[in-house]
Amino acid sequence: MMDDDSGADGLPEAHLRLAEALVFASAAPVQARALAQLLPEDTDADAVLAALRARYAGRGVELVEIAGGVQFRTAPDLAPLLRRVIAIPRRLPRAAMETLAIIAYHQPVTRPEIEEIRGAALSQATLDALLEAALIAPKGRKESPGRPTLWATTPAFLAQFGLPGLRDLPRREDLFVEPAAPADPPAEAPDA
């Protein structure tokens, strides 16, 4: 039986405990509507998640918005310290990262469109690596000759990169590094 004591936020402690357990047990980000299915009908799931987020603010784990839901994540200031003892997932090859970036910014996009933007052929191994990592998925077929597959990113992509949604991708123009201004050549000594 759940406890009905109210916390400092005015919400029943039982609701906060249930939300905490759901988020902790879920492998994927939890959406408010999933929590709402477990709470009494007159309970605002968004308010429960906001109260839980406030409760965890500044702690070793925090409740953050990821991929359209919420998930517990290590506090950003502690993550570098944990890298010493926690295995870091295998990095994707450069071609896979380039392909993933193209898909993220141009989705849905076909393989020929990816190849045109990259200026290089796209190997099946690269697509397979992204599919295996669940970072991309087919999203239908383009209404054009040959009906090529359309590719798009997945919620796992958003979770992997800590993004609440696609609109939170960095702007493309912010990704380009401006070349450093050339240094002025040393002044020549006058002839004496």
Image (cartoon, rainbow, N blue to C red):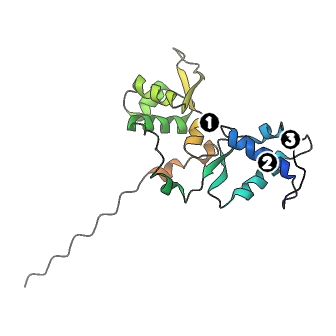
Which disc is residue 39 wearing? 3
Query: In the image, 104: left or right of 122?
Result: right
Between 68 and 148, the one nearer to me in the picture: 68
The residue positioned 42% from the left and 23% from the top of the image is 124
Question: Of helix, strand and loop, which one carries label 1?
Answer: helix
Please give the residue where the numbered disc 2 appears in the rendered image: 17
The residue nearer to you, when weighing 108 against 48, is 48
Disc 2, SS: helix
Q: Amino acid at mark 1?
A: Pro
Snapshot quadrant of residue 112: top left
| The residue positioned farthest toward the left in the image shown | 192
Residue 5 or residue 113, whichever sits in front: 5
> Residue under circle 1?
155
Residue 44 location in percent, x, y? 86, 47
Name the residue: 62% across, 57% down.
Answer: 60
Between the C-alphas of marks 3 and 1, the distance is: 25 Å
Where is residue 100? Give x, y as percent.
Answer: 49, 36
Contact check, label 3 and label 1, Cβ < 8 Å: no
**Residue occupying the point 39% across, 36% down:** 93
